Image (cartoon, rainbow, N blue to C red):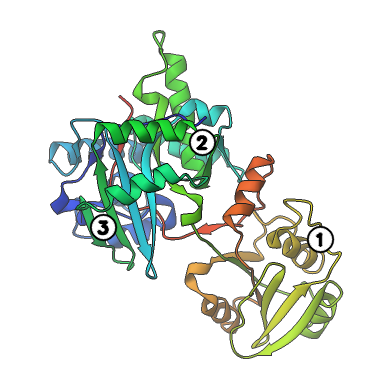
Amino acid sequence: MAKVKPFKGVRPPKSMVEEVASRPYDVLSSAEAVVEAEGNPKSLYHIIKPEIDFGADVDEHDARVYVKAAENFKKFQDNGWLVQDEKDHYYIYAQTMDGRTQYGIVIAANVDDYMTEKIKKHELTRRDKEEDRMKHVRVNNANVEPVFFAFPDNEALEEIIRNVVKGEPEYDFVAPDGFGHHFWLVDDAATIEKITSEFEKIPHLYIADGHHRTAAAALVGNEKAKQNPDHKGDEEYNYFLAVAFPASHLKIIDYNRVVKDLNGLSPDEFLEKLSKDFIVEDKGKNIYRPDRLHNFSLYLGGKWYSLTAKDGRFDDNDPIGVLDVTISSDLILRDILGITDLRSDKRIDFVGGIRGLEELQKRVDSGEMATALALYPVSMKQLMNIADTGNIMPPKTTWFEPKLRSGLVIHKLD
């Protein structure tokens, strides 16, 4: 059963939240962070991307960069830009995009739940990326950025969310990207106890986004437990920062592909080979969006095509084989275009659906890419089924939007 707890959050005063809060560290480059933080000493980028305080010749993984993160975290607290709550809280964090709002509960999740796979993952992690975030957690002795969890819908927790958000939010603002962020404190003792007990009834939490941050947070907590001869299991380092959303609140958007060449084929030869496994329909010059599972859209030579996988070309009983990302990776990218490793092949790139299908068309029309493939998004039900069966999603399958805003609350490990 999921073990969670409230915690004394470290967070900005209400008047400063828009100056402090930032996008997550991994959705923008160091150069972009320099631009976004320009003229703003309170920007969280000084903690989560502290290479911006050095010249462009200093690598983001330089030892001095991690030291600077800790210096800046201390400075933010000394200056009153981040202040620790005096008592334990849960928090409700809501995000609004395109008129739709999703509501999550900010929790301290349990390290042992991750180590024993009660917190389920659907992606492989890379050790170098884990180690980078572990260094960041160690040097700050804190989880500065939250991870993004989902949990099976629970009516009692939904009711708590509905009641809490009737009150005045602590933070309520629209970020520069147009997404709304709303944040409430849960400080009623009975409600806090109820949240803890309801999570205990939930068998598993699911990592939606942030697999490397989750692994890093849990591994550092596990390290600290082993290093403490008086370890009891209730220390703060046994927990890490997460925002957990009811699964029905979340919407996965498409994650699309662009390919540099047709593997020596002419456009007509490529379409001919596609017709072996797909029903190919010419949709003309207007953008065509996939409208159901196993339907894809292809942009090639200034025209859009609908591709529908023929019966018998995939296994409906295989949780991985039935995914559109698997069907397209096997039947198009591997069998026709010769792309076998999505993680390392330089002939392919990936475009989050937040950028729209216009971005696919633009990259092909510019001559940079030869063709583009748009996929129907994975569902939360598919994601949870894959995690439950111990399977791993193929690379670049899910794209969650909006991203969690960093800097609304931080969890210290002591």
Q: Which of 188 and 61 is in front in this view?
A: 188
- Is 94 left, or right, of 128 in this rendering? left
Q: Residue 37 carries which label?
A: 3
Amino acid at circle 1: Phe
Classify 10 Å Cα crowding around label 1: few (below 14), some (14-19), many (20 and above): many
Q: Of residues 243 and 284, which is closer to you in this image? A: 243
Spatial distance from mark 3 to mark 1, Cα to Cα?
48 Å
Left or right of 194: which side holds 261? right
Q: Find residue 397 and report its horizontal and vertical position in percent.
A: 61, 57
**Badge 1 vs badge 2, beta-carbon distance below 8 Å:** no
Q: What element carries label 2?
A: loop
Look at mark 2 in the image and give the residue it sits on.
202
Residue type indicated by callout 2: Ile
The reply, left or right, for residue 325 in relation to residue 271 is left
Q: Is mark 3 on a helix, strand or loop?
A: helix
Q: In this view, does 3 lie above or below 156?
A: above
* Residue at x 40% of width, y 33% of height: 240
Q: Earlier in the sequence, mark 3 or mark 1?
A: 3
Residue depicted at 45% across the width and 60% down the height: 401
Tag in front: 3 or 1: 1
Q: What residue type is labelled 3?
A: Ala
| Residue that sits furthest to the top in the current view | 229
Q: Can residue 310 be seen in this view?
A: yes
Mark 2 or 3, nearer chain start: 3
Residue 59 visible here: no
Residue drawn at point x = 81 percent, y = 57 percent: 315
N-term mark: 1 or 2: 2
List the residue tagged with mark 1.
Answer: 314
Vertical comparison of 336 with 205: above or below: below
Q: Where is residue 392 in the image (x, y as percent from the top left)?
A: 66, 45
